[in-house]
Amino acid sequence: MEIVVLLYAAMLYSLFMIWKSFDRRRDQECYILDYQCYKPTDDRKLDTEFCGDIIKRTKNLGLMEYKFLLKAIVSAGIGEQTYAPRIMFDGREDSPTLSDGISEMEEFFHDSVGRLLRRTGISPSQIDVLVVNVSMLSTVPSLSSRIINHYKMREDVKVYNLTGMGCSASLISVDIVRQVFKSCDNKLAVVVTSESLSPNWYSGNDRSMILSNCLFRSGGCAILLTNKRALKDKAMFKLKCLVRTHHGARDDSYGCCLQKEDDQGRLGFHLEKNLPKAATRAFVDNLRVIAPKILPIRELLRFMAVWIYWKTTTSKNPKKGVSLSPEAAASASAKPPVIDFRTGVDHFCIHTGGKAVIDGIGVNLDLSPYDLEPARMTLHRFGNTSAGSLWYVLGYMEAKKRLKKGDRVFMISFGAGFKCNSCLWEVVRDLNGGDENVWNEDIDDYPPETLTNPFMEKYGWIQDEDPSTFKMPE
């Protein structure tokens, strides 16, 4: 009889431990309750005429640099409504101060974090975790400390202040929150992601460093996350998985994006010619890890079978003088098979690193114009807002009412180092675009009939100028 009782007790204890383990995992989930992208005021918009004024007053440029800039701006996919820091409008981009960078960030913090907390009804004292990522501005006290001081957060708030992580930093921040949630129950976290442009305008004539002036624009986002089970029904998204790939050990990848000084000592952001190759390599390695986590087994098996067949047919080396049949020749010259990510993904949230980045991902994943539209429109309207860009793309999808309960959103980002980070979100409830969605005022105008900007129309005459007689008009 005692043995039976012991067996029952052991069985009940085992069942209890299994239930406890399952229940524990439910408290480790990571949800997005809300997010707020930053929309600067209209007096900070960069139209064609003002961009021309900025270029004219950059005294170190010659005709060849003007031609290079024109080509870069025209092909960048950026429109006339992007935003710049106030220092540009004051004409002081060549002589930034520390306070310029701080005030730029505080303007964003106070607007977006404030809106996020008011809309969700969350008090600053309820925040348990704060993660701030601004790559190119480090201050004492830190930017995270400035937020804590402004909102009077608790003294035991867990704080992480990231710098130097590049455009992929927001997913790194989400990963930090996810790791905290694994060991702490019932927590609220705020991720603040942006970039400070005020101290980072390049005023020299090195083409590899001029390019960043054409792409980067002001912006940012504040995101509220939780692992509170009681709030899951109010959440917008649930994190399914997140994968980070870092190629910093490879010298060519490490050196393709660098903040450095040029030969004249002017600080800027250097972009190496091998950047696309480094990005592709990191992207492929990242996909190898995340694909099995997010795609159905049937697609993985289909791809494996097609790849083996393709590899077999293309590796055959016919003897000299023997020609292939038309079918075999077509098979041998065909492109490698592409795994269909749309079998496990409904929406693609792509970092707006530039038109070439978006197009490259589209080709590699065989995506449709519909899939790429959110990223292209975000690049046109807001430019490359560094780590914050993913959330503007997500906001576009929401404003277009594309996000329905159960949909899966695949986020892809790249950053200096060189890094590729990606994650998959599940939409928890139908999302129809909130009252404060950053796209609300513009969404009916997108997509426009054409993304061509007017720079060529206004400044195309530079292409016909002679270097020996050229003089930029005042």
Image: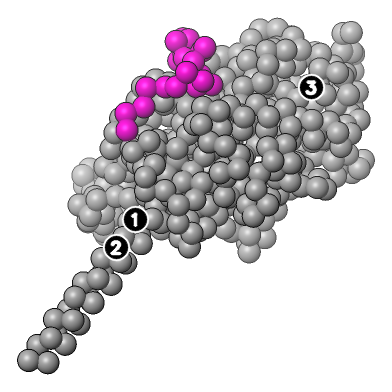
Q: Would you name the residue on which mark 1 appears?
A: 26
Q: Closer to the camera, 155 or 115? A: 155
- Is the residue 71 above or below the residue 296 in the image? above
Mark 1: which secondary structure? helix
Would you call the spot at circle 1 few (<14 residues within 10 Å), some (14-19), or many (20 or more)?
some
Tell me if 147 is positioned left or right of 191 in this view.
right
Range of magenta residues: 429-449
Disc 3 designates what residue?
86
Residue drawn where x is 72% and y is 17% of the image = 44
Query: In the orientation shown, which residue stands out farthest toward the bottom?
Result: 2
Amino acid carrying mark 3 in the image: Arg
Q: Residues within 10 Å of mark 3 (few under 14, many from 20)?
A: many
Q: Is residue 209 magenta?
A: no
**Which residue position holds label 2?**
22
Whether pointer 1 and pointer 2 mark residues with C-beta atoms closer than 8 Å, the reply is yes
The percent position of residue 446, horizontal first and vertical second, equals 46, 14
Image quadrant where one finds the C terminus: top right
Residue 33 horizontal/vertical position (percent): 45, 37
Gap between marks 1 and 2, in whole Å? 7 Å
C-alpha gap between disc 1 and disc 3 = 46 Å
Secondary structure beneath disc 2?
Answer: helix
Q: How is the image coloured?
A: one colour
- What kind of residue is marked 1? Arg
